[in-house]
Image (cartoon, rainbow, N blue to C red):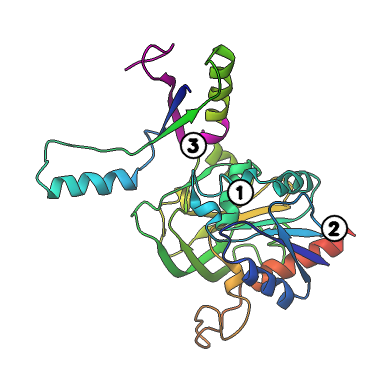
Amino acid sequence: MRIGVITFPGSLDDRDAMRAIRLAGAEPVALWHGTHDLDGVDAIVLPGGFSYGDYLRCGAIAARSPIMHEVIEAANDGMPVLGICNGFQILVETHLLPGGLVKNDHGDFIRRDQRLRVESTASAWTNGFAEGQEITIPLKNGEGGFVADEATLDRLEGEGLVAFRYLDVNPNGSLRDIAGLRNERGNVVGLMPHPEHAVEAGFGPDTSDAMRSGVDGLTFFTSALSSMLART
Amino acid sequence: MPTIVVEVMPKAELLDPAGKAVTAALHRLGHSTISDVRLGKRFELRVDGEVDADMLKQVEEVAADMLANGVIEDVISVRVDGAGAAGETR
């Protein structure tokens, strides 16, 4: 199973995402934004960072880069696509996921280990979790406030498309504490927090067992592996 | 070379943390009568040749499609800048 990670100018977490994919047991494949070549991958990760320096709007220019034609096509054909942080911003700019992401309501960049509730396991990237499972993965962003109009928010809730919700604190003013979404088909997931930074004991968030032992993020990638196996 | 000016503002119902920070700084400096500041964007698009209805329409589409994200922003105006040009408002 090969999972592509697309590097845009200004991507930061592409190599972390590739490492997470490898630790989950899949083969990471480096992809470049300026091509039209998905290199035959089975799934795609849009990594975190500051593509194009967040110029225009976060993710706006990356969403219109050459390779995104193929990504949108593949996503519409059912290929698993995960957008993390800037990747989530790119997904909303392509309209593969609804809503928008705006500056944190308190105006500051925030970095914290964030507790989340898994609200939907009906996706390629969350099927390994239990419904309602509480997980902790790092969050780090300046523009992570999820917004959408009331009708869209009601539809997202009604159709079970909210994938993750913030617990304990709402770190950025996201409406209805929404941290991540899935699409109707369940192959596309986007979220602001970073699963790829919680995949190896010693380098993850603290847990009650031991410092930095949190590996809740690994399940995103193992979920994708099992959903790809189910597809073939 | 004519310039088309596009102005984009965050939607009125959304919090504008940058505008709030500027307002707070102005208040600290004693400008208490300035009650609110909102920050938007101004794009200046240089175009080749005359600006006709087709060109304006093209820019309006670009503004709605890329320069602004309709979920979080509104296009406030699309107009030709410069003396004597059609659509000038200044």
Q: Which residue is mark 3?
A: A150
Quadrant into which the N terminus of chain A falls: bottom right
Callout 3: helix, strand or loop?
helix
Is the C-beta separation of discs 3 and 2 under 8 Å?
no
For the residues labelled 1 and 2, the Cα–Cα distance comes to 21 Å
Q: Position of residue B69 (x, y in %)?
A: 52, 36
Residue that lies at the very extreme toward the left in this rendered image: B30
The front one of B10 and A230 is: B10
Mark 1, residue position: A62
Q: Residues within 10 Å of mark 1 (few under 14, many from 20)?
A: many
> SS for tag 2?
loop
Q: Is residue A131 above or below residue A58?
A: below
A165 or A46: which is nearer to us? Answer: A46
Q: Find residue A223 and report its image quarter.
A: bottom right
Q: Earlier in the sequence, mark 1 or mark 3?
A: 1
- Tell me the quadrant of the picture where the C terminus of chain A can be found: bottom right
Give x and y (percent) for residue A49: 54, 61
User: In x, y percent, where is residue A191?
Assistant: 57, 57
Q: Residue at x 26, y 49 (%)?
A: B21
Which residue is located at x 57 percent, y 25 percent? B61
Please give left or right for residue B68 compared with residue A228 in the image: left
Which of marks 2 and 3 precedes in the sequence?
2
Name the subunit of mark 2: A
